[in-house]
Image (cartoon, rainbow, N blue to C red):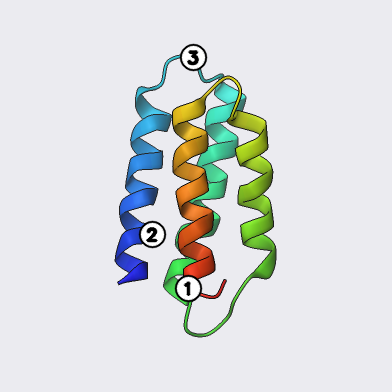
Amino acid sequence: MPARELQQQLDALREQIDQNPPLSQEERVHLNELAQKIEAQLNLEPATNDTNLADSVNLEVERFELNHPTVAGILRNIVQTLGNMGI
């Protein structure tokens, strides 16, 4: 169940990346790279746990919370889900 929830949150993040015009190209690239890391962890989850992934997402929350609160909220949900998955 958490894996499906994480996938839904990733989909929401990608939607924000595509539809949120105030994001700079650099921010879009950075968020896409983060989404790819999360997706890779989701696919590998039973085999390995990247403990740095949650830290990376938390840093992005701090980076985006002031100017892009919707993106930051999605990232917070991702951190919570990763924690629920033991990552």
Q: Residues within 10 Å of mark 3 (few under 14, many from 20)?
A: few
Q: CA distance from mark 1 to mark 2?
A: 9 Å
Relative to 2, residue 21 above or below: above
Residue, x 47% and y 53% (percent of image)?
Answer: 78
Residue to which mark 1 is pinned:
85
Q: Position of residue 67 (x, y in %)?
A: 57, 19
Q: In the visual, does 10 lie left or right of 54?
A: left
Q: Position of residue 19 (x, y in %)?
A: 35, 23
Q: Quadrant of residue 16?
A: top left
Q: Are marks 1 and 2 in contact (CB under 8 Å)?
A: yes
Please state the total of marks drawn on the protein image: 3
Q: Residues within 10 Å of mark 1 (few under 14, many from 20)?
A: some
Q: Are marks 2 and 3 in contact (CB under 8 Å)?
A: no
Tell which circle, 3 or 1, labels the residue nearer the N-terminal end.
3
Tell which circle, 2 or 3, labels the residue nearer the N-terminal end.
2
Q: Are marks 3 and 1 in contact (CB under 8 Å)?
A: no
Which residue extends farthest top?
Answer: 22
Q: Quadrant of residue 59?
A: top right
Tell which circle, 1 or 2, labels the residue nearer the N-terminal end.
2
Relative to 36, residue 81 above or below: below
Residue, x 50% and y 44% (percent of image)?
Answer: 75
Q: The disc labelled 1 sits on which kind of residue?
A: Met
Give the quadrant of the N terminus.
bottom left
Q: The disc labelled 2 sits on which kind of residue?
A: Leu
Depth-wise, is mark 3 or mark 1 nearer the camera?
A: 1
Q: CA distance from mark 2 to mark 3?
A: 25 Å
Q: The disc labelled 3 sits on which kind of residue?
A: Pro
Residue to which mark 3 is pinned:
22
The circle on residue 6 is 2
Residue, x 44% and y 68% (percent of image)?
Answer: 42
Q: Position of residue 86 (x, y in %)?
A: 54, 75
